[in-house]
Image (spheres, helix red, strand yellow):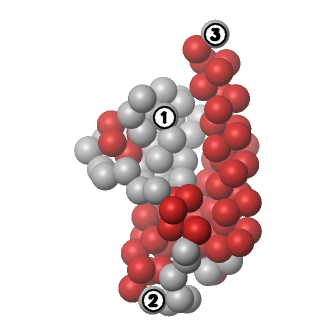
Amino acid sequence: MKTYSEAQGKPKFDWNKFLENPPEDRSDEHLFASTLSSKWVTCACGNLCDIIPRSIKGKPDDRELERLGIEFDYEIKKGDFVTAKETLAKIEKLSTEIIERLTK
């Protein structure tokens, strides 16, 4: 399966790998990740399967997934990588449930 990012011609970004060894606060790597997290195409939600229903700009139609994506962006920007990792796990769990519903 392709991620939404890949389907939109953007490279896939491994948020789990990034969060395993997070950068120093306000480093170039942190600022780069903050830029990615602020766009629906490249954020944690954008790096999920492209069959998840979305708006034209990539925002998930599912309200809870949208909320978690906004939280994730905020946590990345704050440099709260521990909480961001927890939120990412919630995003992945919910996206799996959405995909299962769509493919039944």
Identify which amino acid the numbered label 1 is placed on: Cys
Confirm or deny contact between disc 2 and disc 1 (CB under 8 A).
no
Identify which amino acid the numbered label 2 is placed on: Ser
Residue 100 position, x and y percent, is: 65, 21
Q: Quadrant of residue 93?
A: top right
Earlier residue among tags 2 and 3: 2
Confirm or deny contact between disc 2 and disc 3 (CB under 8 A).
no
Relative height, residue 101 to residue 71 (above, below) = above
Query: Could you tell me if residue 57 is visible in this image?
Result: no
Mark 2 Cα shell of 10 Å, populated few (<14), some (14-19), many (≥20):
few
Earlier residue among tags 1 and 3: 1
Mark 3 Cα shell of 10 Å, populated few (<14), some (14-19), many (≥20):
few
Residue pictured at 42% horizontal, 50% vertical: 41
**Label 1 residue SS:** loop
Q: Calculate the distance from the C-alpha at mark 2 to the C-alpha at mark 3.
A: 44 Å
Residue bearing mark 1: 49
Residue bearing mark 3: 104
Residue pictured at 51% horizontal, 82% vertical: 23
**Label 2 residue SS:** loop
Q: Calculate the distance from the C-alpha at mark 2 to the C-alpha at mark 1.
A: 29 Å
Residue bearing mark 2: 27
Relative height, residue 15 to residue 32 (above, below) = above
Residue 28 position, x and y percent, is: 39, 85
Query: Could you tell me if residue 19 is visible in this image?
Result: yes
**Label 3 residue SS:** loop
Q: Which of 20 and 9 is in front in this view?
A: 20
